[in-house]
Amino acid sequence: MRLRLLTLLCPLLLLGLCWPLHAQENTAPTTRPEIKFGWDSKADAFKLEINIDKSIEVKPATSAEIPGLIAQLAIDDAACAVAAKRLSISGDVVIKPLGETLKSSNPKQCLFAALLLIARNTPAAQKALHAMPTANLVQGLQSDDDSVKGMSASLLAIVGSEKEVELLRAKINEGTDCLLINATLMGAALGHRKSLLTEIEPCLRSANPETRMMAAMVYRMVYPDKAVDKLLAMLPDPLSPVRGMVMLMLADQHTTRVNDAALTLLLFDPEASVRAVAAVAISPAENPGVIPYLIRASHDTSEDVRMACAAKLGECKRSLPIIEALVTLKSDPSQKVKDAAKDALEKLEKVKK
């Protein structure tokens, strides 16, 4: 339920997690792969996903089909999307041909192959990835195509030589290219590149809000044991997307300090999206004293906040005030709030039995 709520409540915040290989905004179905990272709290790592139009049926590729699908990675249309998805679910049989594709002169094809190897995340896939030639990646840093530039920086942070890493470090210190900086931070985190990890903490204080958001995310990934203090210090950020992202990164930390910070944002933050994330981050099971405040916040003007509060009340120990609040929310004008209240009441009823 927590992951579902975060997806529903934070589309703008999660935009900062997307790799810069996505379709332009339009009303048509997605025809190019959308490469996104979502936080897998169980694995304590990022999960890479390739999303395409859900109406398209995909199946694993046979060995005979793999060369043709890899060729389609160079084509910027729906065929590329389906090919990427099929290769991503075809197992280790794709590793060797994808490794050979890393030598391709077509930058998009090369970068998609690298992404798919990252998605495999097996020793064999990592070995193939680290054998990737880097000359094209260095050239890609100068590309006018944001997707090529971003992927080049991320991959160079993972597989580049120390000399090439110093080039990335210089770009970070220049502080002028937000896309390149953010992509480098992501690559450093994914590859756990020690020589670049020292650049993450200074980026928490970057003048660019997008870089602050990316730095918060990768800091939480790389330094989970000491991230709480650093992230709590960022919560007074003047920009709501940054506050929301930081709270999102703290959502699985059920400490008193995090709970108090989430409660403060829930009650007083002027931005509804931040209040909604704060409601998700609150842990009433460990801190039952927050229940009256959740009930109070269930009257918020934002339907996202009311929905999050309803879901959280369903995690509490059954009581008359909670039942009354949820019954009220079942009559909410918003259908998603009604559904959340109904689910919460059913959950409490099951616990009762």
Image (cartoon, grey):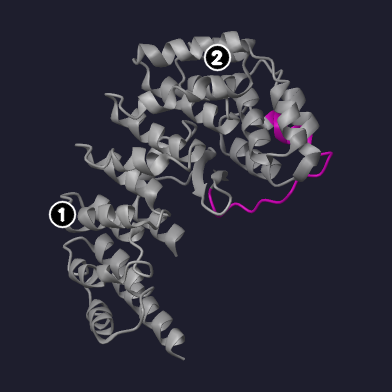
User: Magenta region's main secondary structure?
Assistant: loop
Q: Specify whether 242 is left or right of 23.
A: left
Amino acid at dot 2: Val
Q: Mark 2 highlights which residue? A: 165
Number of marks drawn: 2
Q: Residue at x 39, y 55 (%)?
A: 6
The residue under the point 38% across, 44% down is: 228
Q: Quadrant of residue 217?
A: top left
Q: Position of residue 275 (x, y in %)?
A: 24, 55
Residue type at tag 1:
Phe
Left or right of 95 in this view: 52:
left
Q: Residue at x 73, y 39 (%)?
A: 122
Q: Position of residue 35 (x, y in %)?
A: 52, 38
Specify the segment rendered in magenta. 53-71
Task: Specify whether residue 164 is painted magenta.
Answer: no
Secondary element at tag 1: helix
Which quarter of the image is occupied by the N terminus? bottom left
Q: Residues within 10 Å of mark 1 (few under 14, many from 20)?
A: few
Q: Is residue 350 above or below residue 240?
A: below
Residue 211 image point, x, y percent:
36, 28
Image spot of residue 299 (x, y percent) = 17, 69
Vertical side of 225 occupied by 340: above or below: below
Q: Which mark is residue 38?
A: none
| Residue 199 visible in the picture | yes
Q: Tell me, yes or no, whether the highlighted magenta stretch contains residue 60.
A: yes
Could you tell whether 21 is left or right of 213 in the image? right
Assign a secondary structure to mark 2: helix
Q: Which residue is mark 1?
A: 268
Crowd tier of the residue under label 2, counting other residues whose Cα lies within 10 Å: few below 14, some 14–19, many 20 or above: many
